[in-house]
Every structure is written in C-alpha cells, then in structure tokens.
Image (tube, rainbow, N blue to C red):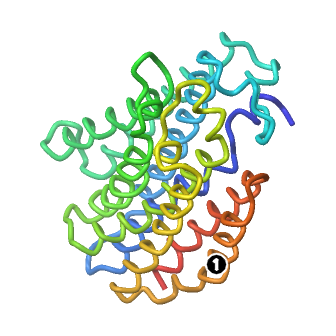
C-alpha cells in the first residue's frame, strides 16, 4: 500500500462520522429542517479532523520513540521509514488547511454568516477540535501522554460530534441528542482503550500514561466492557432498540478481548464498524 495512504489510517474513518450520522439523523427525525449540504460538509470536516489527528499521532509517537519497537501493530510510514518527518509535516499542513476550509464552509452553510454569536461559538469549537487533534501526542505537553486521551475522544467524537451536528441542522438542542452523543462516545473511547490495552507494556516503557495503563490489564478490560454496556443501555433507555442488533457482535468482541492478550489489533475494525452500525440502527 502507498505509505501516504497507509498513514491516513483509513480504517478509522467510519468511527469519525458515527456521531455526525447520529446527530444529523436525530435532526432529520425531529420536527426540524434537515440540510443535505450541512450534512456533507460536517462529514468532510469530521474526516479531515480524524486524518489530521492520525497524522499528528504518528508524528508525535515517532518523535518520542514510542512506536518503533512495537510488533503487534501495523507499521505506518514514519515507523517503517517510508515517509520522512518533513513529508509528514507537509501532510499535516494539508489536512489542517482542509479542516479550516470545510469547517468554515460548514458554519457558513448552517448559519448563513460567520459573524453572529452562533457562528463564533462554532468557530471556537472548531479551533478546539483542531487543537485537540494536534495535541493528542504531538508536543511536550500532549494530553494523550497524560491519561486524558479517553476524555478527549469522548468529548470530540461523542458529545461535540453528535450535539454539534444536531445543532447545526436544527439550531436547537435537546436531552436526547446529548445522551445519544454520550452513548456513541463510549464505544469511540473503547477503540482507544483497546489500542491502549494492546500497547500497554510499550507505553509504560516510553512514559506514555494512558487510562488503560493506569488500570492494568484486568481493569482495562472491565472498563472496556462497561463502555459498551453503557452505550447500549443509554440507547435502550431512549427506545432505540435496534441498537441491540450489535449485541451478538459485541459479546463475541468482549469474549475475544477477555481471552486474548495478543492480536487485539484485529478487533479494532470490528468495534469501529459496529459503532458506525449502532449510529445507523439508533435512527431506525
């Protein structure tokens, strides 16, 4: 595979649009208007932010030497030596520009102007999302190395993604959108937690503190189980019973996570795509 494409980590992209689909779908089902252009621009913005985060994550880990000794994960461009740091920085600038371009177009499409209080609020949120994507592992004070990665994923991929998409469509907010945002945020955090369980030993060696490394192997798995159970519980409480269709998949996934210490990387696409399915099933 082309090393540039490989570093984009395309398999993570379905996860990034789950909240957008959920929030936009809830808006469509509500007695409010739905704008297809807003939806498309929101998807493009989310995809650009996800790729920016992936690239910055690879660069940050490479600069700290975190990735180079791992054997249980796919070697990306910098780790494999097929992309230089200069080339990676060029890609980061490219997708940073795309984030700004799509985000600006999204806000203008939703509100018809960039100069009102709503637009200003979303501009600030967009800048925070870009900063969050960059600072996860990049720089001296990267929050991913301080055990705050789970919180960042929950806020940006769960609450902000879902509630933001809902508000951009309806220019209003309700508790269902907020709780559904929390629900979809849980399995998004689960993907990161699974990654951290897999890399636990290596992260400890390189001083990367993650929530999983603080909890330990057993605690990390209990936490992982709680995230998925919490997701389906919230959706069920709001009457989104179709989300339970993923229960057999998640039961098998949890069995695998609890009974295997290796090859956990293979379970990430399972959780990513099933989370996307959950966001769709919640709208049936």
Residue 28: percent from left, percent from top: 37, 75
- In the picture shown, does residue 73 fall above or below 139? below
Residue at horizontal 78 percent and vertical 42 percent from the top: 72
Residue at horizontal 32 percent and vertical 35 percent from the top: 128
Number of marks drawn: 1
Task: Indicate the quadrant containing the N terminus: top left, top right, bottom left or bottom right.
Answer: top right
Residue 234: percent from left, percent from top: 37, 78
Specify whether 202 is left or right of 100.
right
Residue at horizontal 53 percent and vertical 80 percent from the top: 281
Specify whether 278 is left or right of 195.
left
Q: Front-most of 170 and 37?
A: 170
Q: Front-most of 215 and 47?
A: 215
Specify whether 125 is left or right of 213.
left
The residue furthest right is 1
Specify whether 171 is left or right of 204.
left
Residue that mark 1 sits on: 251
Residue 129: percent from left, percent from top: 37, 38
Residue at horizontal 38 percent and vertical 66 percent from the top: 23
């Amino acid at each position: 595979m082309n090393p540039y494409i490989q570093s984009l980590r395309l398999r993570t992209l379905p996860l990034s649009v789950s909240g957008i689909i959920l929030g936009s779908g809830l808006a469509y089902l509500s007695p409010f208007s739905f704008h297809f252009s807003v939806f498309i621009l929101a998807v493009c913005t989310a995809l650009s932010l996800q790729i920016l985060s992936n690239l910055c994550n690879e660069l940050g880990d490479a600069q700290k030497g975190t990735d180079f000794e791992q054997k249980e994960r796919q070697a990306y461009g910098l780790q494999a030596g097929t992309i230089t740091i200069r080339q990676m920085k060029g890609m980061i600038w490219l997708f940073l520009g795309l984030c700004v371009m799509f985000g600006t177009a999204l806000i203008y499409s939703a509100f018809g102007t960039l100069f009102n209080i709503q637009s200003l609020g979303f501009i600030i949120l967009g800048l925070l999302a870009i900063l969050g994507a960059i600072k996860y592992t990049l720089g001296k004070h990267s929050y991913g190395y301080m055990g705050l990665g789970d919180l960042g994923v929950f806020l940006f991929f769960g609450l902000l993604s879902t509630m933001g998409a809902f508000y951009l469509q309806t220019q209003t907010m309700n508790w269902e959108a907020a709780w559904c945002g929390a629900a979809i945020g849980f399995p998004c955090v689960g993907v990161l937690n699974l990654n951290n369980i897999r890399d636990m030993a290596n992260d400890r060696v390189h001083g990367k503190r993650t929530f999983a490394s603080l909890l330990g192997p057993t605690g990390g798995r209990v936490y992982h189980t709680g995230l998925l159970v919490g997701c389906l519980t919230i959706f069920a409480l709001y009457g989104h019973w179709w989300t339970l269709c993923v229960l057999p998949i998640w039961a098998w996934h949890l069995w695998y996570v609890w009974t295997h210490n290796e090859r956990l990387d293979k379970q990430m696409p399972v959780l990513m795509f099933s989370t996307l399915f959950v966001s769709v099933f919640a709208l049936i």
